[in-house]
Image: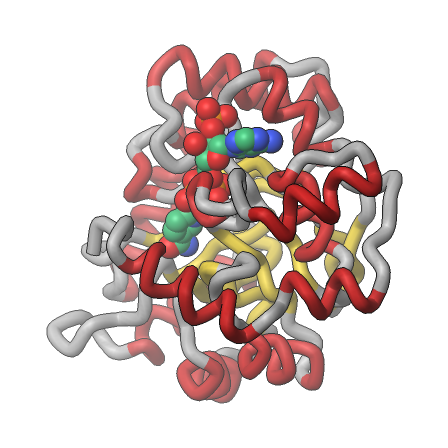
């Protein structure tokens, strides 16, 4: 497993996404993933599965301090009081004394407390030793810039949708200049990459599936981590097996094709629940 050095953190380049994993299935999947070698787990208050994620971590034969554990603040928890309270509630559910990374899940909407208030309280959690790093999710480059200005603690990552059909070059350029990790969510375009002819063809050269090529394409970009969700042992295993081959520059460019990004964007928009 490659590890990305960003600021003072070491972040495993591949994590386990847990959105839509619930109940015993969630606990078992987290446990299996950790025992296979995953060391980065992504959850959120909004996923309603922190308790099962925590149970999976405890059941696995892995030290808690070896797992990079991420959760995210829900929209109703953006006031200073709720940031502090709800982060502690998340830690209780996750069965941990501290979080490796706490994110703002989506930008604060106009009727929510100001971003400065949310970030201020997240900074307090860092000062109190309850949270190692803070970050944001679904922030544009300009909003990320504002967050960096408002926060004393560095913003470790912007977690955004990123895969071959979603162009994030502008954000990636910004992140590289300012030493911010880009964490790619929905890295398989929620299954959209699986029958992509270009990915199939490239994968055939290496004996890899289109999903593995899409993940390799992401983690081969400096400063990018990916957090695919997988629930079968077969998919968990396949997604880990992306560190034993390397795409050529031509293949990297082919996968990034702008015409594909446009087609895929429209395809994917129709699949999104918002
Ligand atoms: P995704 O990871 O792009 O796709 C998940 C789908 O791909 C599942 O149906 C999974 O099937 C399948 N899959 C996984 N590995 C595969 C493989 N090797 N071959 C074939 N199919 C495979 O989509 P996602 O769940 O939207 O995104 C991943 C994670 O990102 C989420 O779980 C969540 O943690 C995070 N996320 C964050 C935000 C945010 O706003 N910050 C938004 C969305 C997602 P099985 O489950 O059957 O294995």
Where does the image place residue 270, in percent across and percent down from the top left?
Answer: 25, 55
Between residues 83 and 257, which one lies in front from this camera angle?
Answer: 257
At horizontal 36% and vertical 58% (from top left) the residue drawn is 105
Residue 99 seen by the camera:
no
Residue 230 seen by the camera:
yes
Side of 59 relative to 27 (left or right)? right
Between residues 208 and 96, which one lies in front from this camera angle?
Answer: 208
Q: Report the colour scheme.
A: secondary structure
At horizontal 59% and vertical 47% (from top left) the residue drawn is 197
Q: Quadrant of the N terminus?
A: top right
At horizontal 63% and vertical 23% (from top left) the residue drawn is 33
Query: In this picture, is 28 found above or below 266?
Result: above
Q: Quadrant of the C terminus?
A: bottom left
Where does the image place residue 254, in percent across and percent down from the top left?
Answer: 68, 66
Where does the image place residue 81, in percent across and percent down from the top left?
Answer: 26, 59
The quadrant where residue 219 appears: bottom right
The quadrant where residue 266 appears: bottom left
Between residues 207 and 91, which one lies in front from this camera angle?
Answer: 207
At horizontal 34% and vertical 53% (from top left) the residue drawn is 73
Query: In this picture, is 183 found above or below 228?
Result: below
Residue sticking out furthest to the left:
111
Where does the image place residue 181, in percent across and percent down from the top left?
Answer: 64, 66
Question: How many numbered tags mark residues here?
Answer: 0
Side of 113 relative to 230 (left or right)? left
């Amino acid at each position: 497993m490659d590890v990305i050095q960003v600021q003072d953190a070491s972040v495993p380049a591949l994590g386990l996404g847990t959105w839509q994993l619930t109940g015993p299935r969630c606990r078992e999947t987290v446990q299996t993933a950790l025992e296979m070698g995953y060391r980065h787990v992504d959850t959120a208050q909004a996923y309603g599965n922190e308790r099962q994620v925590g149970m999976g971590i405890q059941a696995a034969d892995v030290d808690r301090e070896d797992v990079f554990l991420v959760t995210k603040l829900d929209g109703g928890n953006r006031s200073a009081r709720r940031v502090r309270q709800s982060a502690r509630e998340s830690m209780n559910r996750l069965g941990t004394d501290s979080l490796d990374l706490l994110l703002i899940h989506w930008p604060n909407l106009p009727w929510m407390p100001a971003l400065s208030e949310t970030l201020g309280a997240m900074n307090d959690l860092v000062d109190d030793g309850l949270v190692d790093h803070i970050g944001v999710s679904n922030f544009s480059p300009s909003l990320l810039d504002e967050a960096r200005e408002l926060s004393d603690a560095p913003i470790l990552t912007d977690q955004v949708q990123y895969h071959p059909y979603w162009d994030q070059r502008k954000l990636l350029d910004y992140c590289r200049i300012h030493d911010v990790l880009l964490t790619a969510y929905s890295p398989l375009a929620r299954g959209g990459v699986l029958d992509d002819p270009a990915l199939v063809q490239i994968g055939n050269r290496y004996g890899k599936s289109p999903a593995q090529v899409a993940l390799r394409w992401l983690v081969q970009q400096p400063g990018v981590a990916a957090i695919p969700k997988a629930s079968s042992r077969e998919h968990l295993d396949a997604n880990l097996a992306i560190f034993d081959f390397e795409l050529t520059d031509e293949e990297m460019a082919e996968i990034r094709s702008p015409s594909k990004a446009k087609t895929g964007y429209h395809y994917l928009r129709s699949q999104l629940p918002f």
